[in-house]
Image (spheres, grey):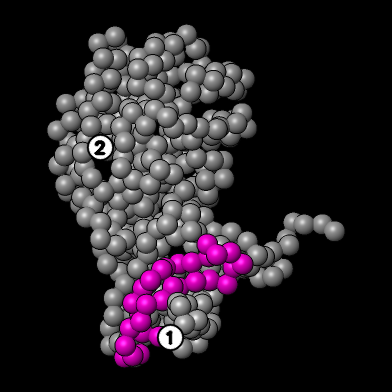
Amino acid sequence: MDSFYYRQGKLCCEELPLDKLADSVGTPCYVYSKGGLLGSYNELDSAFAGLDHMICFSVKSNSSLALLKLLGERGAGMDIVSSGELYRSLRAGVPAGSIVYSGVGKTDSDIRYALESGILCFNAESLPELEALDRVAGSLGKVAPVSLRINPDVASNTHEYTSTGRKETKFGIPFTAALDCYREIRSYRNLRVFGIDMHIGSQITELEPIVLATERLAELFLRLSEEGIRLEAVDIGGGLGIRYHDETPPSPAEYAKALVPVLKPLGCRLIIEPGRYISGQAGALLTRVIYFKETGVKNFAVVDAGMNDLIRPSLYNSYHRVLPVSEDNKGRAVSMDVVGPICESGDWLAKDRLLPPPEPGDLMAVLSAGAYGFTMSSNYNSRPRGAEVLVDGTGYRVIRRAETLEDLVRGEEL
């Protein structure tokens, strides 16, 4: 769902001109579309309407309390990877029984907090983790519901940093060892087999690897059934990609059409853990030009947002579309890099873009920034982070205020 478009020469989020928002809230800031967020969720939810399913939003993609609350009110569960994400989810009003806990490094305190909260299940990734789950659950007089995250050894054909389904990665239990691991669970007094889980990567734009990995998961599910190990749920993870540049990711309908024939015969509940697909295109980073610098070799639009605000371009060499907020500048487009004020050569938001030469004070919007944007931001160079804003039609509200200089040293002592 495209929530950012030009109207009367001004870039808008839904029906709100972004220049008016910037004048009121300041820059840099993250802007989210309520309609875009819920529209993407509803589209995915509807695609799997033929199956008993639950969408657990990946909190790591965008952990804003307001966004979690909106999704929770629509019936979404949450996929978390830390005690902090559990706290956020509960604070946003999401029922603990709709939360699954993923991640390779759960500590005893993490496990204790999750058990005491009553989460739906743990996606366990190793035998040592199973031992920890059993020990902590026993100390609390509880039984921990467990799904094993299986590594199906399937390449997701995405960036190496976000590809998690190959056997060389740190994630999951090897497919060849999975059957023995499920048998092993029977020896633990404080564990209960809940389901089976996988997640092969992020920003996946092809159906083939997802289908192959799901088929392997289904094969293992059936072998477990033959041994009398009954599973309540199959969790196929997330990773469905979005369009940043020239990608052609499958639609939710295509995604479901390819997977439902594999999953429906299993006769159990389906759990999906999308993040980027729901929040990615619903957000943009709004930034203001400080200088336009011409060196004779290269042109630079120096803006007030940097790699501390949006690290994806520097970290993954990621492409984000950049648009001027005003179309009033009718000058001939020239090639330029859009860069921030951070003292790093890697501090850039876009390279070699054809844009009209901007004037100081002009606004730019970095699109498709609603996932892994603010949630990966930092205070590097002691820079306060900007506000987060939720737009609904012609109105908006600040859902996280901009940080102050005092916020930078809060909690520190001389």
Q: Which residues are magenta?
A: 329-357
Image quarter of the C terminus: bottom right
Q: Is residue 290 left or right of residue 268?
A: right
- Residue 40 position, x and y percent, is 28, 56
Q: Where does label 1 land, which residue?
A: 358
Image position of 273 with respect to 265: above or below: below
Asked if the stretch drawn in magenta spans residue 334, the answer is yes
Single out the residue that lies furthest toward the front: 297
Q: Is residue 24 left or right of residue 7?
A: right
Q: Regarding mark 1 in the picture, which secondary structure is present there?
A: loop
Displayed quadrant of residue 370:
bottom left
Image position of 366 with respect to 57: above or below: below
Q: Where does label 2 land, which residue?
A: 209
Q: Amino acid at mark 1?
A: Pro
Q: Regarding mark 2 in the picture, which secondary structure is present there?
A: helix
Q: Nearer the viewer, residue 85 or 212?
A: 212
- Residue 108 position, x and y percent, is 61, 28
- Residue 22 position, x and y percent, is 47, 80
Rate crowding at label 2 as few (under 14), some (14 to 19) or many (20 or more) other CA atoms within 10 Å: some
Asked if the stretch drawn in magenta spans residue 98, the answer is no
Q: Is residue 300 visible?
A: yes
Q: CA distance from mark 1 to mark 2?
A: 43 Å
The residue shown at (34%, 45%) is: 158
Rate crowding at label 1 as few (under 14), some (14 to 19) or many (20 or more) other CA atoms within 10 Å: many
Return the mark for residue 255.
Answer: none
The residue shown at (57%, 22%) is: 132
Image quarter of the N terminus: bottom left
